[in-house]
Image: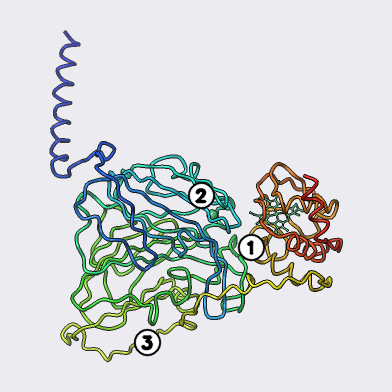
Amino acid sequence: MKRIKFISFSLVFASLILSSCNSINQEKKVVDASKIAVSGTMEAELTSPPFVPASVGDRPAKKLIVNMEILEQEGTMTDGTTYIYWTFGGSVPGSFIRTRVGDEVEFTLSNHPDNKLPHNIDLHAVTGPGGGATSSFVAPGHEKTFSFKTLNPGLYVYHCATAPVGMHIANGMYGLILVEPEGGLPKVDKEYYIMQGDFYTKGENGSPGLQPFDMNKAVDEDADYVVFNGKVGSLTGDNAITANVGETIRLYVGNGGPNLVSSFHVIGEIFDKVHVEGGSTINENVQTTLVPAGGAAIVEFKVDVPGTFILVDHSIFRAFNKGALGMLKVKGEEDKKLYSGVKQEGIYHPEGGTIQEMPTDDSKKVIVNTNKSLSEKIASGKNIYTKTCFACHQANGEGIASAFPPLAKSDYLNADVKRAIATVIHGKTGEITVNGEKYNSVMTKQTLTDDEVADVLTYVYNSWGNNKTNVTANMVSEVKNSH
Ligand code: HEC
Ligand SMILES: [Cu+2]
């Protein structure tokens, strides 16, 4: 008896709970995205910043093919300063990917054969181990395919997650993937893609020439550059984003980090709506929104008056001294009722905002000199080292703790020249001990001519306290043929 009473009581109780749940469900239609069926296949349009692909509108969920190519390439950081960027799709941030909830994304990540390093991708929009990282690890000259279903709408960061992770992100390996809700986001007039990143270089901000990555500054979070879209001036002057008075603007704002959190603000505008952290909560009438490292926000506003509106990280020294400054130029009729203004255009011009062409790669035009002196070999070797080895072994051969062994004063290097030659031409895996420290990682095989291997190793042997061996092309070809 007691038991029956208890059961009937719990039934009433349960139905009470259920009915209250039902009324919630009616207000907010809960769709199990994992059950959304796909119809048809399409190739994803990918765009480089500040542009975004066409909106999904009311298209049904599909199998969406994404082909992403990793390119390591030299680019301009600021006037007179270049940097070797590692990129998803040739831009920093990487190509924008636009999907809708329920899509089955078939993702192919290809690592260009000219690249030096293995990479992978962790997409925060993925429900699965490593966000795809474990399934996408890919060596130069290879590609990997994996697929995932988009379950949660929102704006998500993707990034490389190959060790040392911080270094891959610091070199520009991040971007955004948008998952639109069923039916798409509401229509607006203009949409743009902006992503902040912090950069760490051997020289101070503005030091000329090709600047290598500085691991120590990165660990100390002591950024030389904090920029939008990969470089100083990517969104200023002729590169400014544009709109007309009366239009509605949506900015997809991301932050790749690796370290700094952005206080994103547009001087002279109020965000009508912010999708906080890129999710479903909408805040209204916001002045400055926080964009976490590895996070995003969608901001929307209507432009009511003409002028140049300045986009900043409101940690303001970053904007005026480190590069985190962009421009939105709005054209149209003034409305004195809204703003009477003495308009001062251009007072916030950043230093070094002009854009340079990509430098042409003179190193490809090699004049073969078979009878080089030792100092000519060292000079040529230094050039090869900067292009090929320094990403891992670092500018002064110091390496990176527990990832890349040092070449400076390396007992391993100095003990056996044939072994060093073999390491460069065949690559190396498995545990080795250098100066008492164990390393167990992968050095990819380097595609260099015998002369180039000889020159780069001669440079290494004649630098940083090593034993001054002069490696010849004959020694290299002997090692090659003995295998
Ligand atoms: C993708 C990163 C990477 C690049 C690029 C790279 N190396 Fe390495 N290198 C490594 C790793 C990792 C090891 C250790 C491998 C292991 O653990 O078995 C290594 C080991 C070595 C060693 C033996 C260990 C030592 O410290 O003496 C030498 C010599 C060497 N590399 C020279 C070079 C030269 C010269 C170049 C450029 C032509 C180069 N490497 C390019 C990652 C790299
Ligand atoms: Cu990477």
Q: Quadrant of residue 61?
A: top left
Q: Which mark is residue 346?
A: 3
Residue that carries the numbered disc 2 in the rendered image: 120
Q: Residues within 10 Å of mark 3 (few under 14, many from 20)?
A: some
Q: Residues within 10 Å of mark 2 (few under 14, many from 20)?
A: many
Q: CA distance from mark 3 to mark 1?
A: 36 Å
The residue lying toward the viewer, choosing from 409 and 239, is: 239
Asked if residue 452 lies left or right of residue 113, the reply is: right
Visual colour scheme: rainbow
Q: Which mark is residue 216?
A: 1
Q: CA distance from mark 2 to mark 1?
A: 24 Å
Residue at figure coordinates x 33%, y 68% from the top left = 288
**x then y, percent, for residue 360:** 56, 75
Asked if residue 28 lies left or right of residue 159, the reply is: left
The residue lying toward the viewer, choosing from 288 and 302, is: 302
- Count of numbered circles in the view: 3
Element marked by disc 2: loop
